Amino acid sequence: MSRHLSRLVLFGTLALLCVLAVADGAFFLAALLGIGAIFTGRRLLDRQGNRRRELWRWGRENARELSRIAREDRIAAPQMKRLERLQAGLLESWELLPEGYRPLLDEDVFTILGEVEGAARLARRRAALRQHLDSVDRLEISRRIESLEQDLAELEESSPLREPLESTLSGRRGELASCKDMLDGISMINAQLEDAESLLSSLRGELLALDTSLSPGSLDPGLAQLKSRVAYFRQSMDEMRRSVETLPAATTERLLAR
């Protein structure tokens, strides 16, 4: 939207300068400004071309982010590279469709790119969770819990030391429970990203399998199946984002709101 607005401003500026140049008799300059205004105006009116450029721009941004994660997180690198290749393959498959078919799938392809962006955020969140867990000595926390439990068992009910020990024990148990939640979160993200890989591969295959010898209106069953799978993709990613958002925020990155 901001890019569209900037082009609109540029078109208006060039058109105004062209008029002023004509008024001043600077016809050569006016011709140059007019050519620029015409070119900018054509880009503004070329909605389909603009959407195609926007898709590829978004795809490049996703690819850069996936590559960045791959460099920063060696464990995730192979998966990030696979996601990058799958996104590129999907866009190429969409680009190969005849002109009449692309508008029928534009919104779905935009949705897919949005979910690839979401997958990158999930990968970053997973890396942050792993980094935090690596910094926590869970075995030492477990030993401390056992020691506190033993100390409490040896104290009398009326002992003034009982309350601070119980508070400390509760805090240690909370730390251990938080670590378990993070491990569960990492497992959920792993499963979700694997599902994203599988679904992207399937969607690319279904795009390539569309019978483009028929008229677009005759492809309703195939298109409906594609759209259904894209909707499932988005729903599953949304559910995953909500699940991961319940994990402790103080130690991990917050997922950006869409």
Image (spheres, helix red, strand yellow):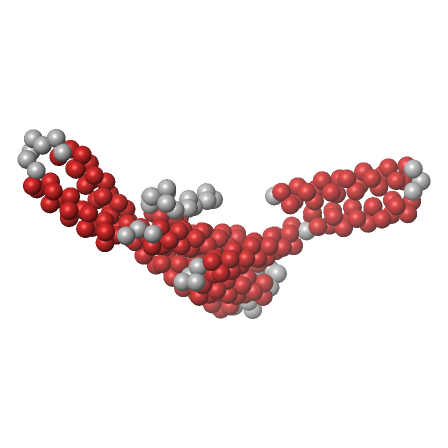
Given residues 122 and 75, the one toward you in this image is 75
Percent x, y of residue 8: 70, 42
Residue 140: image location, x then y, percent: 23, 51
Residue 233 vertical position relative to residue 202 in the rendered view, above or below = above
Residue at x 75% of width, y 43% of height: 11
Quick one: which residue is furthest to the right in this view?
25
- Quarter occupied by residue 92: bottom right
Residue 209 image point, x, y percent: 49, 68
Looking at the image, residue 106 sits to the left or right of residue 164; the answer is right
Residue 69 percent across, percent down from the top left:
47, 57
Q: Is residue 33 visible?
A: yes
The front one of 239 and 126 is 126
Residue 227 visible to the viewer: no
Q: Quadrant of the N terminus?
A: top right
| Residue at image location 73% in from the left, 50% down from the top | 42
What is the number of callouts on the image? 0
Q: Is residue 31 left or right of residue 75?
A: right
Residue 39 in the figure: left or right of residue 243: right
- Residue, x 88% and y 40% (percent of image)? 21
Q: Nearer the viewer, residue 111 or 246?
A: 246
Q: Residue at x 75, y 39 (%)?
A: 12
